[in-house]
Image (tube, rainbow, N blue to C red):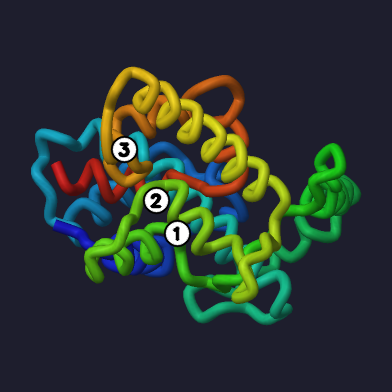
Amino acid sequence: MFKYHTQVSIGDRKVIQSCFKGPWYFWRKLPPFYKRIWFTLFMKKINRDASINYQVEREFKKLVAYRLKGMINHAKREGEKPDWILSDYWTIIHAHWTTAKAKAMSEKACASRMSDHNGLGPHSHPVGSCSYVKVQAALEAHNEDYFYIVVMKKTHKKHDGTYVDQRARLVAETYEKHVQERLEQLESSGEENVTAENLDKDEKKRFISSSRLLDHLNNVISLDLEHLVRFCHL
């Protein structure tokens, strides 16, 4: 059972570093043969029930694609060849970055990250490299509420309570509006001592799923790591 995603994170990173056998600067460049090898190595490291391989593999592909991209981009920013990439592969990868197509894609991605998103500004959070899943697990370990919205607030608020990301603020305000409306409905029907904490978790999830709130939430918090951990818990 994984309480923190660190085991999964270390596992996928070690798989990439130990079996990087080509100039693969993103997931789609990997031959199918090596994709299967990577997943097999990953499953050995986490030692999970083979009966859930299909679910785990589906999430693993998303996770490792994200991880590989991050590791390669980090090497690009540092400007130095990591020990786990052979010199011949590094030369090919470096040459790719200098192509007009790669430069154009990089500039487009940069512009997208810095977009104001219809006035909401670029995505930002103050928790550094600490993942959302780890924050969630820490809250759970201290017997605190670790629901999605709580994690989002924890990872997108300054110490003074203001939001560093306006999309996160929008999600929180919309969710709280749904909760308040539901509490008023319960009170009008004669329910007593009704609080947000007493609401059923499935009902809270329905508030998130309503309208376009889930779309906003997925833009603010990446759930891929959490999904993988949940599958590994089965």
Q: Is residue 98 left or right of residue 1?
A: right
Q: Is residue 135 visible?
A: yes
Q: Earlier in the sequence, mark 2 or mark 3?
A: 3
Q: Secondary structure at mark 2?
A: helix
Give how far across and how far down residue 161 sits, in percent: 62, 67
Between 210 and 199, the one nearer to me in the picture: 199
Label 1: which secondary element: helix
Pointer 3: what residue? 194
Name the residue nearer the viewer: 159 or 77: 159
Q: Give the amino acid type for the residue marked by disc 2 in the picture.
A: Leu
Residue 5 at x, y percent in the picture? 32, 61
Which is nearer the N-term, disc 3 or disc 1? Answer: 1
Looking at the rendered structure, the kind of residue marked 3 is Val
Looking at the image, is mark 2 or mark 3 nearer the viewer? 3
Residue drawn at the location 35% of the way across and 34% of the way down: 58
Q: Quadrant of the N terminus?
A: bottom left
Name the spot of residue 202 as percent of width and height, x first: 29, 30
- Disc assigned to residue 132: 1
Query: Quick one: SS at disc 3?
Result: loop
Q: Which one is nearer the viewer's eye here, 89 or 65?
A: 65
Residue 83 image point, x, y percent: 51, 80
The structure residue drawn at horizontal position 83% and vertical position 54%, both measured from the top left corner, is 114
Residue shown at the point (21%, 51%) measured from the top left: 43
Verify CB contact (< 8 Å) between mark 2 and mark 3.
no
**Neighbourhood count class around disc 1 (C-alpha, 10 Å): few under 14, some 14–19, many 20 upward:** many
Do residues under tags 1 and 2 come within 8 Å of each other at their CB atoms? yes
What's under tag 1, amino acid-wise? Tyr
Q: Nearer the viewer, residue 92 or 151?
A: 151
